[in-house]
Amino acid sequence: MIRIGAGTTGTEKLGARALWQLVMLALTWPAVTFDVQSASAWDAVEMPQPTLAEQADDAQQNGTIVMLAPEVSLAEYIQPEPSPPATSDNATTPRTRTTPSDRQPRRRPSRSSTRSTTSDDDPYAFLLADAPPMHGHYYNSGGSVGVVFWHGGDSLTNDLPLAGACGRLTIAENNKALPEDRIYFTYNRFNGAMQSFGTIHSLSPAPDFVGPSFHERASVDRYTFGIEKTLGMGNASIEFRMPFSYREDYAYRFVEGGDIGNLGVITKFLAYESDRMSIVSGIGLETPTGSNVEFFRDPFTGNAYTLQNQAYGLEFYVGMLRCPEPRFFYQGFLQLSLPLNGNRIVAPEPVTDPSNILDAPTLLHLDGQAGAWLLRRELLGKNMSVAAVMELHYVTTVSRVDEFSLSHLSSMHGEPISMYVTGAMSRRSEARGSVARNNTADLTLGIHTLFQHDTAIRIAAVLPLQGGENRILDSEIIVQLERKF
């Protein structure tokens, strides 16, 4: 190799390099094969060649285009350098705060992610997904029927178990302001929900009542099966609910009803979503799939009055869920329940109202929830979280409660009577001589337990905050099971 001394000029260096390359080319000419696509004759010269990365850097600085050979992939130019191995077994990398793009999915965590990511790794990973749904509360019997006897002023009133006494569709019940994929089961024990009261003095023989003046309450057990499925990219969902019931027998036995409730269909649309808050809106539809009610069956003819379950209902609502930090959460729902039509009354005798239709009142629901996580840790090889929840529920009638009345000679013990039937969430107040408009407020306290971010068990108790005519029931117990998929 020709060695160029320190005193050689730049022009001399270039000339010497070019002369050396020509000499080497002449010596190796017979063994050189030119390939237009892949290489040149200079490849045969055993000269130090720059790496691919150096060629890319030179091309970027000079503003030229580098042509790659077919056997060279672009990945070789951009492949990152391998990270150096750890110096020891105990070497660890420092923890850094994750960004929103690095976090796990908020609504539908995968099976692998739920087993590999805990709240300790990233407290923001499942912030909205782990927030519990509302336990909810609202109950009404579907209206009431009352009788006033013309002789003696005796009267009695009984709740009507329309649609299996399952109550009207409530959006905030076992629901969250976020579209999800889940199946669930809800058990409600409504203590003292079905009521009957009155005074019986002048009838002879006396009917099978507990006493001349009575106020009886019976409990209702409701079983609800539901499924919710997201649509599209997960920004909407549709939910189906189907309730069934079991009721305790009354002591006086003049009201008969089934145990099938109304099928509810709820659509949910995501209006806004961030890492810590979501806002939804939607429409629910209550369909009259439940049982009818028969009352005051004549013991001689077998004829009875029938309240047919025929009313559809629309539920307009908005909801909001917010998690200001990993430990705390709160959410709320606002619902307007609007009946589309009424329930028909079929009487064995002519009635005073020719329409024979009993309309349900329009209801306004206000529901709020606040809670905090008490435990979020790895327990027995599983991710387990426990939260305490408090909820307030308020329901009031917006429209006038409808009333259906009739007067005729009844064969019930040969006494003439006046009969009236009122709409849902109402009972006639004889002291005021009008239909009572109800508004009810309740407090719900519950515990939410979550396993693996996809299986939940919730238990809650509901306590009425009002008394008198506004007291819908004595108390309530709620048990909910949920599985996300």
Image: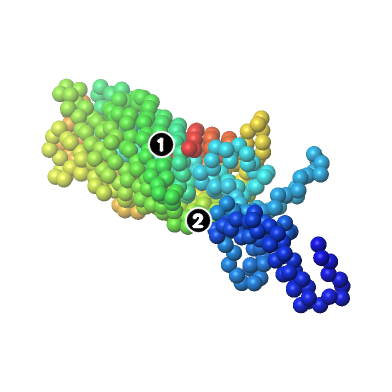
Measured as percent of width and height from the top left, residue 212 is found at: 34, 28
Badge 1 crowding class, 10 Å Cα cut-off, few under 14, some 14 to 19, many 20 or more, is some
* Image position of 397 (left or right of 306): right
- Residue 226 circle label: 1
Residue 380 vs 402, above or below: the answer is: above
Q: Residue at x 31, y 22 (%)?
A: 208
Counting residues from the start of the chain, the first of labels 2 and 1 encountered is 1
Which numbered circle lies on residue 350?
Answer: none
Q: Nearer the viewer, residue 179 or 166?
A: 179
Residue at the image point whose x is 63% and y is 60% from the top: 41
Percent position (x, y) of residue 20? 74, 66
In this picture, residue 353 sits left or right of residue 114: left
Badge 2: how crowded within 10 Å, few (<14), some, or many (20+)? some
Q: What label does residue 273 carry, if any? A: 2
From this viewpoint, is residue 16 visible?
yes
Q: Position of residue 321 (x, y in %)?
A: 52, 52
Q: Residue furthest left?
A: 350
What is the three-letter code of the residue carrying label 1?
Answer: Gly
* Colour scheme shown: rainbow
In the image, what residue occupies the spot 72% across and 61% down? 24
Task: Please tell me which residue lies in front, 446 or 274.
Answer: 274
- Seen from the viewer's position, the closer of residues 447 and 466 is 447
In the image, which is nearer the foreground, mark 2 or mark 1? 2
